[in-house]
Amino acid sequence: MSQFFRSRARVSLAPGLAAALAMIFVMAGAPAAAFAPDLFGYQQAAQDDIAAFPQWLQMLERQLRDNLRDGDCGERRLNRCHMERWLAFLGGLRGRPPAEQLREVNRYANEMSYVLDIDNYGIEDYWAIPREFFGNGGDCEDYAITKYFSLRWLGYPEGELRIVVVQDTNLRVPHAVLAVGRGEEILVLDNQVRGVLSHRQVVHYAPVYSINADGWWMHLPAAAGRRS
C-alpha cells in the first residue's frame, strides 16, 4: 500500500489499453444516482486524469481480457478451480436481498489469506484481478477489487461502487476498502471487519481518494473542501 501515497506522474497508456477501457465503460452501463458526497464525513472533489493510476488501469485491462476459465479441475490434491467456485457462489446470490449479497460477498473474499505484494509478485504494489487473488491471496486493495468485481457481476452499477484508499488513523497505516453507495447511505466492505458497516460507524478512516472505472475523486476534510 505504500505507493498509494506517493506522487504520481502522468503516464501514457499501453497500446490497446484505451480501447479496452472504452469497452469497460460501455459495459458499465448508465450510472446510478450520485454517490453520497460525505464519505467518512469528508467532502469529495472529482478529478480528471485517471491515467495517474496506471496500476488500476492495467488491472482493469487484465480483468477484461481474462476469460474466467480454470485449468484442469480434475486435480483432487489441490483445488485450482477458483473461477468455477467463485462464479457458482455469485450465481447463488442472484436475486437475493442486497443486504445478504453484500454480507456474503464480503465474507467470501475475506476468507482468503492476506499476503503482501512483495511476497506474491516481488514488487511493493500490485493490483490483482480475482483470478490472481484467489490463487495467491493478496493485500487490502486486492480484497476490495475482488468485492468490486463480484458486485459488478451481480449487477450493481459502476456509479455505486468505489475502491477507497484511506489512512487508518488508529494504526497509522494506509488501507483500502470497497465502498457501496445505496441512496444516501454508503456501506463499507473491509477485509479487517467481518460485517458490512455504514461509513458513519467507522471513525478511524480518513479517505484520501476513491476510484472506479468511471473516474476518481479526492476526499477533503469538511472545512477544507467544497462539495462536488
Image (cartoon, rainbow, N blue to C red):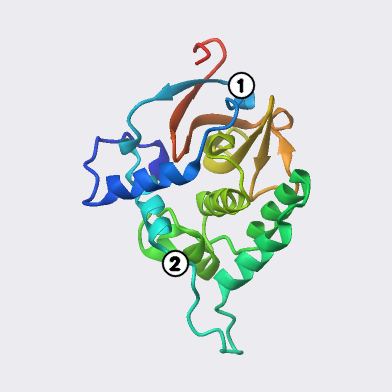
Q: Nearest the camera: 213 or 12?
A: 213
**Front residue of this view, candidates 120 and 152:** 152
Give the SS element for disc 1: loop
- The earlier-in-sequence mark between 1 and 2 is 1
Image location (x, y in percent) of residue 53: 35, 40
Residue 125 seen in render: no
* Disc 1 crowd, CA 10 A, few/some/many (<14, 14-19, 20+): some
- Relative placement, left or right, of 183 versus 72 is right
In the rendered view, tell whether residue 146 sits above or below residue 6.
Answer: below
Q: Which mark is residue 67?
A: 2
> Which residue shows up at 72% across the image and 62% down it?
92
Q: Disc 1 versus disc 2: distance between alpha carbons? A: 37 Å
Residue 58 in picture, x, y percent from top left: 34, 51
Task: Give the camera-side residue of 124 and 216.
Answer: 216
Residue underneath mark 1: 38
**What amino acid does circle 2 point to?**
Asn
Amino acid residing under circle 1: Asp
Task: Indicate the quadrant where residue 199 lies.
Answer: top right
